[in-house]
Image (cartoon, rainbow, N blue to C red):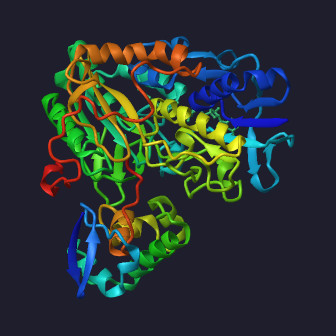
Amino acid sequence: MTRIVILGAGTAGTIMANRLRRLYAADIRARRTTITVVDQETRHLYQPGLLFLPFGGYEPDDLVRPLRKQLHRAVTLVRETIDRVESSANRVVLASGNTIDYDLLVVATGTRIAPEETEGMTGPGWREKVFDFYSLEGAVALRDALKRFDGGHLVVNIVDMPIKCPVAPLEFAFLADDYFTKRGIRDRVRITYVTPLDGAFTKPTCTRELTHLLADKGIELVTEFSAGRVDGGKGILAAWDDREIPFDLLVTVPLHAGAGFVARSPGLGDDLGFVLTDPHSLQAKVAPNVFAIGDATNVPASKAGSVAHFEAEVLTANIRRYLAGQPLTPDFDGHANCFIETGHHKALLIDFNYDVEPVPGHFPFAGFGPMRLLRESRLNHLGKLAFRWVYWNVLLPGRDIPAVGPRMSLRGKQFPRPLTAAVPEGLVPR
Amino acid sequence: MSTTVIANRELELDAEGFLQKPEQWSEEIGVELARQVGIDPLTDRHWQVVRYMRDKYLQTGQAPSIRSLGKDSGVSTKELYQLFPKGPAKLAARIGGIPKPHGCI
Ligand SMILES: Cc1cc2nc3c(=O)[nH]c(=O)nc-3n(C[C@H](O)[C@H](O)[C@H](O)COP(=O)(O)OP(=O)(O)OC[C@H]3O[C@@H](n4cnc5c(N)ncnc54)[C@H](O)[C@@H]3O)c2cc1C
């Protein structure tokens, strides 16, 4: 009997459970294989919706569904908190003291926000003047605060990388511009985007495009700001180098870390609690029968649902190979595909991987599209909204998206210069 | 990718000036790399961070993050930013001759 155990039933864990269930359907029926998933939650949260909730775009109920229902019946769900993985004994220890033995383990426990790790952040003013929108409670509290906000300085800040969905805070700033414009008070609100990076985004061509958009919308940009302290009482965001930014409302993307049990599991993770993972095969470094996927890994790809989807195709194939005694294929290329909501019913679309940065062009079909890459359009915005349907009905059940494979395609992409050439320093806005 | 000559050695650098081959590094090269990013002279406190960064990388294949530098290098986060304004992890990696930490995607 082969016991497959998946830790976490979020986006990646659910996709993997459903894909492996399909792959091993006959073995499961014959009781030769079991698939067990462990998660501490009862609800599955559609996290991309958290971006829209503060602006009244969704109600909390629109974004949550029962976690069990997203998993095929033949998958066993254990509702407990994971305490640690003992990979030398092929065993998972739960907080209750119960243990689960495995033959093959997939770690898909995502990333968590750690606002308490920044001095003062959860002190006075937390969820009164200082908010996150990366949790459901935070997003709901922020919605109520935005309703009350009738002018002043709104600061949107990323404390440090890595964060999940690295474009979400930018989108938040764009949507805030839209929201206050519609409320007729945009002239009374100053919006500042404060980032530890040296530009609006991490990839040069995309950074240029996004910097223009920020300027067009009158959003100020402060770069290379490493936030070290928050004083919610006085309304001050301070950097480690002592620069200070006063705010009336702070929307922060707090520090991210891997699930707490990763650090308690010998050899499993790095110093932030992300699982040490081969970036191409998705095998964990700790043991050959341990794999990792989604936000939980330390691979240098975006932490996004679309990435988890592309990884899942590669990981399913590699698990099949591993269990059949065949060599793994290093097929994952870091493919990410993200809509960037820019407000006023428009969005950008970016498609990139480990080696190729986002560029303009058409997607997924060259010359035709219908989606435009790195250009604002209404169709992209509709694509972003349609993603919620795609998420519940295509991604989570573990189906493939037509015409979009796990490996990034160069079709339809327009490169500003030969792919190998370096981007000159001066092109990155500072 | 480009090459440069420091201390009579030809070195391979990436587009942002990070050494591509850590084994090409020497302390003399570290001093020159520091000068290029405006850190001159390199004090003992700088060296403590640079050496910690480089040793960790050579042991684990991973550059430590700023968060663990602040906890484990013996230099507080506050002081790290005084020593390496704007980006302690990035600058210490560059001076220590190891690839750019890939925290940012
Ligand atoms: C505001 C926002 C906007 C976003 N927008 C987009 C977007 O537009 N497009 C996109 O592709 N992605 C987007 N994302 C990112 C996307 O939601 C995540 O990348 C994705 O959900 C990651 O899936 P995962 O399975 O790795 O982690 P998660 O879905 O977070 O799942 C982790 C699971 O592990 C469980 N778990 C953790 N620790 C334990 C433990 N100790 N014991 C038991 N269970 C545990 C948790 O309960 C959870 O269910 C967005 C995210 C946010 C926050």
Using the image as rendered, state which of residue A45 and residue A202 is in the foreground.
A202
Percent from the top left, x then y, of residue A83? 75, 45
Q: How many marks?
A: 0
Q: Residue B70 location in percent, x, y? A: 48, 65
From this view, report whether residue A29 is shown above or below residue A249. Answer: above
Q: Residue at x 30, y 66 (%)?
A: B85
Name the residue rendered at 41%, 21% in the picture: A54
Visible residue check, residue A388 = yes
Q: Which quarter holds ligand 1?
A: top right
User: Residue A151, how many percent across, how many down?
Assistant: 25, 25
* Residue in front for this viewpoint, A172 or A292: A292
Q: Is residue A57 visible?
A: no
Q: Quadrant of residue A214?
A: top left
Q: Residue at x 28, y 53 (%)?
A: A224
Q: Nearer the viewer, residue A263 or A353?
A: A353
Q: Quadrant of residue A75?
A: top right
Left/right placement of residue A369 relative to residue A148 reads: left
The x, y position of residue A339, in whole percent, is 34, 26
Which residue is located at x 36 percent, y 62 percent? B100
Which quarter shows the N terminus of chain A? top right
Position of B19 with respect to A160 (left or right) is: left
